[in-house]
Amino acid sequence: MSVTIPPHVRPKHPPDLELVGVTKRFGAFTANEAVSLKVKAGTFHALIGENGAGKSTLVKCIMGYHLADEGDILVGGHSREIRNPQDAYEYGIGMVYQHFTLVPAMTVAENLVLSRPDLPAIINWRNEFDRLYAFMRTAPFQIDLDTPASQLAAGEKQKVEILKQLYLDSKFLILDEPTSVLTPAEADEVLGLLRAKVVAGELSVLLITHKFSQVLNFCDDVTVLRRGRQTGSGRVKDLTADQMAAMMMGGQREPKIVPKAATAPGPVSLALRGLCADRDNGVPALVGVDLEVRAGEVVGIAGISGNGQRELVEVIAGQREATGGEIRVQGEVYTSTRAEACRHQVFLLPEEPLRNACVPHMGVAENLALRTFDQPPLARAGFFVSQARIRAKGRELIARYGIKTRSPDTPIGDLSGGNVQRAVLARELGSGTARVLVAANPCFGLDFAAVETIHGQITEARNRGVGVLLVSEDLDELLALADRIVVIAHGRFVYETTPATADITTIGHHMAGH
Amino acid sequence: MNASESIGWWGVVLGIFAGALRGGTPFLLVSLGECLTEKSGKINLGLEGTLLMGAMSAYAVSYHSGNPWLGVIAAFGTGAGLGAIHALLVSRPKVNDVAAGIAMLIFGSGLAFYLGKSYIRPSAPQLPALSLGGWSELPQLQAALKLSPLFVLGAGLAFLLSWAFNCTRWGLRVRAVGDAPVAALALGMSVKKVRFVAIVLGSAIAGLGGAHLSLFYPGAWTEAISSGQGLMAVALVIFARWRPVHCLYASMIFGGTQAIAPALQAIGITSGYYLWNAAPYVLTLVVMVITCSPKRTLAGSPGALGTSS
Ligand SMILES: Nc1ncnc2c1ncn2[C@@H]1O[C@H](COP(=O)(O)OP(=O)(O)OP(=O)(O)O)[C@@H](O)[C@H]1O
Ligand SMILES: [Mg+2]
C-alpha cells in the first residue's frame, strides 16, 4: 500500500531513494526480479550489468515510464507511487534516456523549453531566451540554441540531453549510458562536473555505464544486475574492476583479445576522391576529402562529433547524396546501390543502428535477413521469400552472436540497446564474405564483453583482408584497432598518424580544429 | 454583361480574385483542420465526409432555427463529433489512420446524403456578407469584396494556429507528439490526449468549411456541393509544408484556379471550359512535381506521420 503525498514544492536538496523488491515483467518475460537498491542523498551511484540485464528497465520504473509489477519505491523515506515522468519530476528526479528523447523537428531551444513541466500556457520567447542564455553561460558545454535537433550528431544530442536535465534543475539525476558517444575527455569533463555538484551536496546521481574506469573514478557505490536480478553491490573503494566483472558475468572469465596479424596491406579497396556533401540544411559538411583504405587495413577517423563524420558515413551508406567527388570500391565507381553493395560485399555498422540499420517494428530474424532476403537460399527462384528459412537463418545468427531476444519474431525495437547493435553486427559480418566494412561508433552502448566481441570481429575481418573504415569518437578504440588514424575537423582531413607514433595531445589539438 | 465587357480582362482578374476568397474558404478551413491533425502525427482523410456533414447540418439547423449562426455552431459540433470517432479509432493499437479515414469519409458522406435528403428543396437563411467594397464604383469589385465571415475567421485562425505552434505550450506539445511520440512520452505527455484534442479540433474546423458551402457560397445544400474539396485539402497541406499561414496562401491559389473557367465564361470565352475546370487538379500535380526532391524528406513533415507509433 503506497501513500501518495505530492510535495507542492520541488525538493531543494537531493532526496534519499530506495527500491525494495522491484519486479517488472513484460508478458511472460521478467526483466527485473526483486531488485533492491539504495542511493543515499548526495552520492554518486553506479548501476552496471551486461546488455539486456535490465538496467534501463529498472530506472524507467523509477521514472514512472514503466510501472513496477511488485515492490516499492521510497523517496525521502516515504513510499511513493510514481505513475509517469511528471510525478518523477515533482520529486526532483530527472533522467537522460539511452535512446534520444529530443524532438527532431524542433530547435535546441524549443527542446529545452518544452521539457519544462511548469511551462506557461503562452510562451514568451524573449524571457525564455534570457533564461536560456543565462543558463548557457554556466553550462559545461555550448550548443547552438537555434539548430534543429535533427541536425545534431549523436554526441551533440547526448550533450543536449544532459543540458536539459541541468536546465530542469533535477536533484536526482539518472544517466543511462550518457557518455557513450562523448570523447573520453568530454565524458570525464561532464562526469567531473556532475561529481563536483554531488560532492557539494546539490545532486545525487545514478549512473548506468559499461566503463569500469568511470565507476572507479567517479562513483561512491555500485549495484550490479545480471539477468534481471541484483547480483552484487558495495562501496566502489572496496572493489576492483575484476571483482565487478565477475559479479556481472557470474564468474571469472579470461579476456579474449584477437591479435592483429602482421600482414602487408593489399590493393586499395575503398577510395574517396574529392568527396563533398551537405548537411540537411544545405551547409557543406564535407569539403573534398580524399582517402584510400587498402585491403587488410583499418583506417580510423578520429574527430569530435559533428565535424562531418555522420555525413561521410551516410554518403557511403547511400543515405545522403554526394555533392561532389566520387567513391570507388575495388577500383570501380560506387554509387551505393543495393546491387553494388552486394557485388562488392560492402557492409556497414552505422551509428544509432535502430534508426539507420533496422526496421524497428519487424522481427529480429527479418531484420537479420534484410541484406539477403531476396537471394537464394532465403528466396526461392529469386522471388518467393521463405519465412521458414529466414527464421532458421535468424536462429543461427542469434545463437552465434549471443543476441538476447525472446524469439526470432520479437520486434527488434524491443531489444536492449546493446542487443540491437549485436544483431546488426551479426547481419553485416555473419556471412564472412565482407570485403569492405564501414563502422561508425560500433561500440556505442555495449558492455565490455560485447566490445571485446566486436573489436575481435573487426580485427578478424581485417586479418582476413577486409578493408575497414572505422569512424569513432573513442580514441582508445582507434588506438587499439586502427593501422592509420586520420583526424577530421570541419569536414576536412587535417592530420594523419599511426597508433605507434600517435601523440594524444597532438591529435586532440587537431580534433579541436587548430 | 455590359459592365463585364467595359472592364474587359480586368473582369477575369476580379473574377479569379473573388473566386479565391469565396471558393478558397472551404479549402482554407479544411486544410487548417488537416494541418492541425497531421501536426499531431495522424492523418484524417475523412474530412471530405466532415465537410459534407458540416454543410448538411449547418443548412438544416439554419432552416429550422432561422438563425444561420446556429448553423455554423452545428457544423462545428458535427465536425467535432466525427473527429472524436476518428480519434478514438486511431488511438487503438494497430488501427491504420489512412484506412480509418477512408471509412470515415464514406460514413460521413453517406450519413450527410441520408439525413440531408429532405433539405434539398427548401431554402435556409444565409450568412450575412461583410461588404468591404463600398468605396468603389465598380459592381464587380463590390461583389468580389463581399467576404464570407467564415473566410475572415479562417484567415485569423491561420495566423492564430501558426502562432500557437510556436508560442504556446499546447502548440509545442502537438508538434512534439507528431514528430517524436516516444520522446513526448518520455517528457511526460499523454500522446493519446494531445492527439485526441488535435484531431477533434481539426475536424471541427473542417466542419466550418461545410457551413461556408451551404450557408454562403454556393449557398444551398446539394449532394455535389463539396466535389472532392475535402480530399484536395489534404494535398494542399503537403503543398503548404504543414504551415498554417501557407495553407491560407495555398487555398487562395486553389480557390482562384477554380474560378478561372467561370471568369473566362463571364467575358464570353467558353472554349475549353471543362479543361479550365481541371486547373486546380493540374496545379496540384505541377506543384507536387516541382517541390518534391529525392535528396531530402519534405521539410516540416511531422516525423510520426504514416508510422504506426
Ligand atoms: N517494452 C519492452 N517490451 C518487451 N521487452 C522489453 C521491453 N523493454 C525491454 N525489454 C526486454 O527487457 C530486457 C532488459 O532490457 P533493458 O533495456 O532493461 O536492458 P539493459 O540492461 O538496459 O541493456 P543495455 O546495456 O543493452 O542497454 C531485454 O531482454 C529486453 O529485450
Ligand atoms: Mg539499457
Image (cartoon, coloured by chain):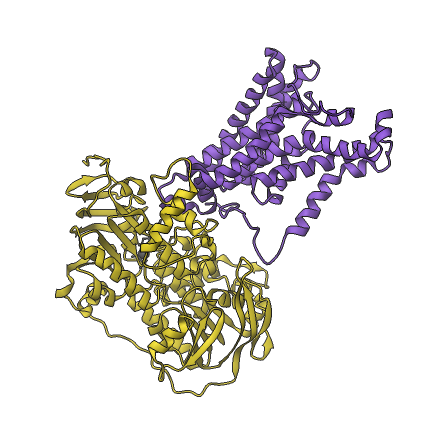
Residue B189: quarter of image: top left
The quadrant in which the C terminus of chain A is found is bottom left
Residue B28: quarter of image: top right
Task: Using the image as rendered, state which of residue B124 and residue A67 is in the foreground.
Answer: B124
Ligand 2 is located in which of the four quadrants?
Answer: bottom left
Q: Position of residue B273 (x, y in %)?
A: 82, 35
Number of marks drawn: 0
Left or right: residue A461 versus residue A68 is: right
| Residue B52 can be seen, yes or no | no
Chain B in the picture: what colour?
purple
Query: Does residue B216 lie above or below B192 as drawn?
Result: above
Outermost residue to the left: A238
| Residue A484 can be seen, yes or no | yes
Instruction: Name the residue rendered at 17%, 69% in the picture.
Output: A240
Q: What chain is colored yellow?
A: A
Left or right: residue B96 versus residue A324 is: left
The quadrant in which the N terminus of chain A is found is top left
Left or right: residue B255 versus residue A349 is: right
Task: Using the image as rendered, state which of residue A310 and residue B106 is in the foreground.
Answer: A310
Q: Position of residue A121 (x, y in %)?
A: 40, 35
Instruction: Name the residue rendered at 43%, 58% in the picture.
Output: A354
Q: Position of residue A367 (x, y in %)?
A: 46, 59
